Image (cartoon, rainbow, N blue to C red):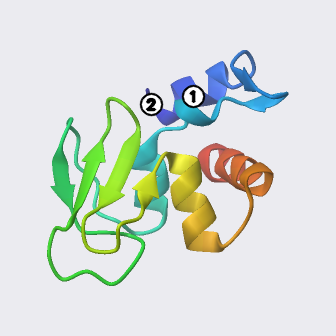
């Protein structure tokens, strides 16, 4: 799902009155935080959650998931935002909306 598709779909896909957290494209969020973006089911990338000299993370752009084998952190795009910015779930959903609509 591209950023523009997500932007259009966010009006219909809801999660507890908000945006569907699983519909947020992981590639857009990781790219925003300066991480390496590669398409695929098991694309090896450098982790955007810590300074990384080698590709220790795996990005799945089909299921919108991310996991780093070095720091053990990952999950959905919302989880990446929560970890990177140190905020809660609702604030991360709002931040994702800001990132994707800017």
Residue on which disc 1 sits? 6
Q: Is residue 40 left or right of residue 31?
A: left
Instruction: Identify the element where label 2 is drawn.
Output: loop
Question: Farthest residue toward the top?
Answer: 12
Residue 3 location, x and y as percent?
Answer: 51, 35
Residue 96, above or below 63 = below
Residue 18, above or below 45 = above
Q: Using the image, tell me which numbered label, if any, was put on residue 2.
A: 2
Q: Residues within 10 Å of mark 2 (few under 14, many from 20)?
A: few
Label total for image: 2
In this orientation, which residue lies closer to the viewer: 72 or 22?
A: 72
In this orientation, which residue lies closer to the viewer: 102 or 60?
A: 60
**Residue shown at the point (40%, 69%) measured from the top left:** 34
Q: Residues within 10 Å of mark 1 (few under 14, many from 20)?
A: some
Residue 22 location, x and y as percent?
Answer: 55, 32
Residue 1 location, x and y as percent?
Answer: 43, 26
Q: Using the image, tell me which numbered label, if any, was put on residue 68.
A: none
Gap between marks 1 and 2, in whole Å? 6 Å
User: Tags 1 and 2 in contact by the CB under 8 Å rule?
Assistant: yes
Q: Splitting the image into 4 quarters, where does residue 53 fall?
A: bottom left
Residue 5, above or below 38 = above
**Residue shown at the point (41%, 37%) measured from the top left:** 64
In this orientation, which residue lies closer to the viewer: 2 or 51?
A: 51
Q: Splitting the image into 4 quarters, where does residue 30 fall?
A: bottom left
**Residue shown at the point (72%, 52%) measured from the top left:** 89
Residue 54, above or below 39 = below
**Residue shown at the point (33%, 56%) measured from the top left:** 67
Residue 43 location, x and y as percent?
Answer: 17, 47
Question: Farthest residue toward the right?
Answer: 17
């Amino acid at each position: 799902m591209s950023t523009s598709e997500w932007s259009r779909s966010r009006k219909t896909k809801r999660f507890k009155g908000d945006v569907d957290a699983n519909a947020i494209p992981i590639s857009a969020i990781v790219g925003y935080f300066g991480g390496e973006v590669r398409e695929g089911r098991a694309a090896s990338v450098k982790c955007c959650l810590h300074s990384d000299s080698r590709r220790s993370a795996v990005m799945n752009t089909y299921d919108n998931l991310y996991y780093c084998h070095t720091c053990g952190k990952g999950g959905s795009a919302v989880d990446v935002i929560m970890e990177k910015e140190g905020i809660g779930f609702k604030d991360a959903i709002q931040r994702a909306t800001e990132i994707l609509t800017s």
